Amino acid sequence: MAGDFYDANNVVVGHAMLMLSPWSATDPVVDLAAFDEVPLFTPDDAAWADFVSAGATNEGFKVNVETSTTQITIEEQSTPVGETVESKAIGIEAVLAEATLESMRYSWGGGVITVTAAAAGVAGKRSMRLSDDIEYFVGVLETRNFNGLARRLAVPKMSITGSGEVSFRRAADKQMFPIRAASLCKPSDIQIVDITAAAL
């Protein structure tokens, strides 16, 4: 509204969806232009063909940015004369709520999930082994902007680890798997794109 110092329409609520794709050294930086016409929260769209969803969460995804700085001082001045960034940690955190091998893989550090089809004398199964190796992924976090359209945060290289306990209760609560996806690329490689209007 004219004359106000703020726009209440810019206050947004809503969940997010984390899409993941295996990273390789030959992967280019993610170009979100390919996703411009993808409807919001539509993981089956062809643009997501190489991605899978991290699944449902207990309380949504959180983006955590921690910046450590160093202040530059001189003897002749009581206040700093400058400030530089020493380190920046960017992570996406969540507690996964789907009790799948995929959730366990992200949280506990698992290897490849092997699928065995049922046959004579052989039970069908999916299995994996835990591993000390850390896997790398390309990640895109999708949420809704103040236009009601997609806002996409793309991280071209991230690791996913987990730390915490999983409770197996009869009825008190569901099984949950905490994860943290940590950015391993330059800040300038991370893109944030707001879709403001559909193409004409």
Image (cartoon, rainbow, N blue to C red):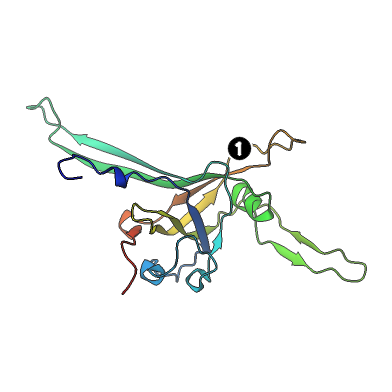
The kind of residue on which mark 1 rests is: Gly
Question: For the view shown, which residue lies furthest in the left direction?
Answer: 76
Residue 120 position within the rendered picture, expressed as x and y whole percent measured from the top left: 92, 71
Residue 21 position within the rendered picture, expressed as x and y whole percent measured from the top left: 52, 64
Of residue 59 and residue 199, the one placed in the foreground of this image is 199
Q: Is residue 31 left or right of residue 15?
A: left
Instruction: Decide: few, some or many residues near mark 1? Use Cα within 10 Å; few <14, some 14-19, many ≥20.
Output: few
Residue 26 vertical position relative to residue 20 in the rendered view, above or below: below
Q: Residue at position x 58%, y 50% from top?
A: 56
Residue 138 vertical position relative to residue 65 in the rendered view, above or below: below
Q: Is residue 21 left or right of residue 196?
A: right
Q: Residue at position x 49%, y 67% from top?
A: 24
Q: Is residue 183 left or right of residue 54?
A: left
Residue 81 vertical position relative to residue 33 in the rendered view, above or below: above
Question: For the view shown, which residue lies furthest in the front direction?
Answer: 1
Residue 122 position within the rendered picture, expressed as x and y whole percent measured from the top left: 88, 66
Which quadrant is the C terminus positioned in?
bottom left
Of residue 53 and residue 91, the one placed in the foreground of this image is 53
Residue 155 location, quadrant = bottom left
Residue 156 position within the rendered picture, expressed as x and y whole percent measured from the top left: 42, 61
Total numbered badges shown on the rendered structure: 1
Residue 178 vertical position relative to residue 158 in the rendered view, above or below: above
Which residue carries the number 1 mark?
Answer: 164
